[in-house]
Image: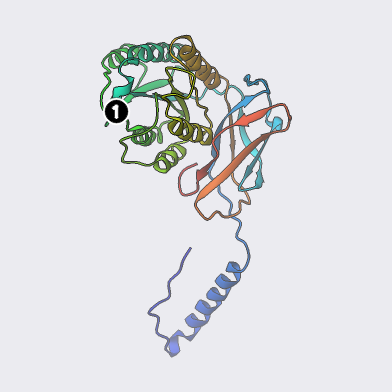
């Protein structure tokens, strides 16, 4: 907290006030000379997927199997839910740029099957929204459980123009940020960004502030590097890792369907872990780094890399 004393003019009746101000100033200076550790009373919530060495989902764990640090300081787990059923808000972002036109029908069919499976089971409050993006970003249908409306919106998609991928992540994050429960983005694309006004850093920060787990499904026509946007794939791998998701690189058909099945399995087997930050060292860039580790060496935890301290965790 900053206090400003400019413009104060001392006169005899103000000597006592001057002494108080000087005393406060001395205390302020003394506090500045030593590290400041802050305690945050807000609850930080983490969606955590746990994998074994073969990459399979690990279930049946207890809170004692996890350890958490924030900015390096150990934290105590306050809330633990195994296979959490907190409602899901899933924003499906479909690339409709010109390069997707020939494969768009196949992608739409796989997305349709995924959304049906999502809404058919799980929490009855789960919902999905559909965004499409090319040179612009369109909200085709807001969050709903109406499968008929989602199917109609999917059938209307057409491929044309550029790829405003980062804009799509940024805008979907703004919508997700204030929704109840868990926030997820499933991004179906064939490459990197070409026409966004927002940058990679803008998109990543927006997703982190929304506590959104990002699952990019990068549909590739062939499995070698020819004709692929390797830089775009790397950017999506980075943003998915920092939000606690993972990137998929399927070809069309069975592998694409399997990618959506794997996403659904993760969402149905996530742990929800929460804590009240205590004794956290200050951070210079407002971003608080959170690390979740497993006490068993054969397991690894996947979750977001942290949160911004000036936003609701």
Q: Is residue 74 left or right of residue 166?
A: right
Q: Position of residue 223 (x, y in %)?
A: 49, 19
Is residue 122 shown to the viewer in this render?
Answer: no
In what element is the residue under mark 1?
loop
- Among the 4 quarters of the image, the one containing residue 159: top left
Q: Is residue 15 depicted above or below 213 in this figure?
A: below
Q: Position of residue 205 (x, y in %)?
A: 44, 42
Is residue 112 shown to the viewer in this render?
Answer: yes
Q: Residue at x 66, y 20 (%)?
A: 54
- Rendered image coloring scheme: rainbow
Q: Residue at x 61, y 69 (%)?
A: 33
Q: What residue is pinned by disc 1?
A: 134
Q: Residue at x 33, y 16 (%)?
A: 104
- Count of numbered circles in the view: 1
Q: Nearer the viewer, residue 295 or 223?
A: 223
- Among the 4 quarters of the image, the one containing residue 62: top right
Q: Nearer the viewer, residue 226 or 255?
A: 226
Q: Position of residue 174 (x, y in %)?
A: 36, 36
Q: Position of residue 310 (x, y in %)?
A: 46, 49
Residue at the front extreme, as displayed: 226
């Amino acid at each position: 907290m900053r206090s400003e004393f400019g413009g104060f003019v001392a006169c005899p009746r103000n000597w006592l006030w001057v002494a108080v101000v000087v005393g406060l100033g001395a205390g302020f200076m003394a506090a500045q000379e030593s590290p400041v550790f802050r305690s945050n009373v807000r609850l930080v919530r983490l969606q955590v997927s746990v994998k074994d060495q073969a990459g399979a989902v690990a279930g049946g764990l207890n809170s004692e199997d996890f350890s958490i640090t924030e900015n390096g300081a150990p934290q105590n787990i306050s809330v633990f839910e195994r296979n959490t059923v907190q409602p899901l808000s899933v924003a499906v972002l479909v690339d409709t740029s010109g390069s997707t036109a020939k494969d768009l029908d196949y992608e739409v069919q796989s997305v349709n099957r995924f959304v049906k499976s999502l809404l058919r089971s799980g929490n009855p409050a789960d919902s999905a929204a559909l965004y499409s993006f090319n040179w612009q970003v369109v909200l085709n249908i807001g969050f709903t459980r109406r499968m008929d409306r989602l199917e109609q919106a999917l059938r209307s998609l057409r491929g044309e123009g550029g790829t405003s991928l980062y804009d799509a992540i940024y805008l979907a994050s703004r919508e997700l940020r204030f929704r109840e429960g868990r926030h997820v983005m499933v991004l179906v694309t064939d490459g990197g960004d070409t026409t966004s006004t927002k940058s990679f850093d803008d998109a990543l920060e927006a997703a982190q502030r929304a506590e959104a787990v990002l699952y990019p499904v990068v549909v590739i026509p062939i499995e070698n590097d020819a004709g692929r946007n390797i830089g775009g794939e790397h950017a999506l791998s980075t943003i998915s890792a920092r939000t606690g998701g993972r990137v998929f690189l399927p070809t069309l058909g069975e592998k694409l369907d399997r990618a959506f099945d794997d996403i659904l399995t993760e969402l149905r087997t996530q742990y929800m872990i929460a804590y009240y930050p205590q004794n956290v060292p200050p951070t210079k860039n407002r971003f608080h780094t959170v690390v979740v580790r497993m006490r068993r060496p054969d397991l690894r935890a996947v979750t977001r890399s942290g949160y911004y301290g000036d936003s609701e965790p």
